[in-house]
Image: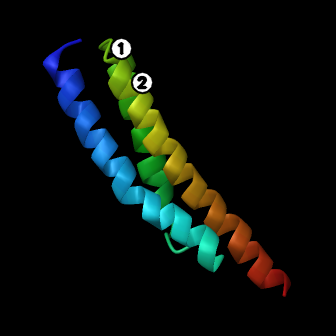
Amino acid sequence: MVWQDIVISVVSVIFCFALLPQVVEGFKIKKGAISYGTSIPIFLGLLAIGYTYYTLSLHLSVALTLIQAVFWLILIVQRDVFSFHKRKT
């Protein structure tokens, strides 16, 4: 494991913990607070970064970056599901 993988992984863990309250809050208040214009580009960018880390054999960084991408995907789905339910009612 190279030092870059460790640094990227530590920062990725911090980002995951920073994003976790937003994901939990979205489920609590049943509202997708993050716009598509923010969440979709970040999600796609994280997938691209994850693939780049994969090509560099930074395996821990790949895993943690994909976890971040999943959190952003959850925010996208929250926005979609909760805004759909608002339109229905």
Secondary structure of the residue carrying tag 2 is helix
Which part of the image, by quadrant, shows the N terminus?
Answer: top left
Please tell me which residue is depicted at 34% across the width and 58% down the height of the picture: 18
Q: Residues within 10 Å of mark 2 (few under 14, many from 20)?
A: some
Q: According to the image, label 2 marks what residue? A: 51
Tally the marks.
2
Direction right: furthest residue: 88
Look at label 1 and name its amino acid: Thr
Q: Residue, x 24% and y 41% (percent of image)? A: 11
Q: Quadrant of residue 60?
A: top left
Q: Which mark is residue 55?
A: 1
How packed is label 1: few (under 14 Cα within 10 Å), some, or many (20 or more)?
A: few
Q: Which mark is residue 12?
A: none
Say if mark 2 contacts mark 1, CB within 8 Å. yes
Q: Give the x, y percent position of residue 66.
A: 47, 35
Q: Quadrant of residue 30?
A: bottom right
Q: Nearer the viewer, residue 64 or 80?
A: 64
Is residue 52 visible to us here?
no
For numbered disc 1, what is the local secondary structure? helix
Residue most toward the left? 3
Gap between marks 2 and 1 measured at Cα:
6 Å
Which residue is nearer to you in this view: 10 or 65? 10
- The residue positioned 44% from the left and 52% from the top of the image is 41
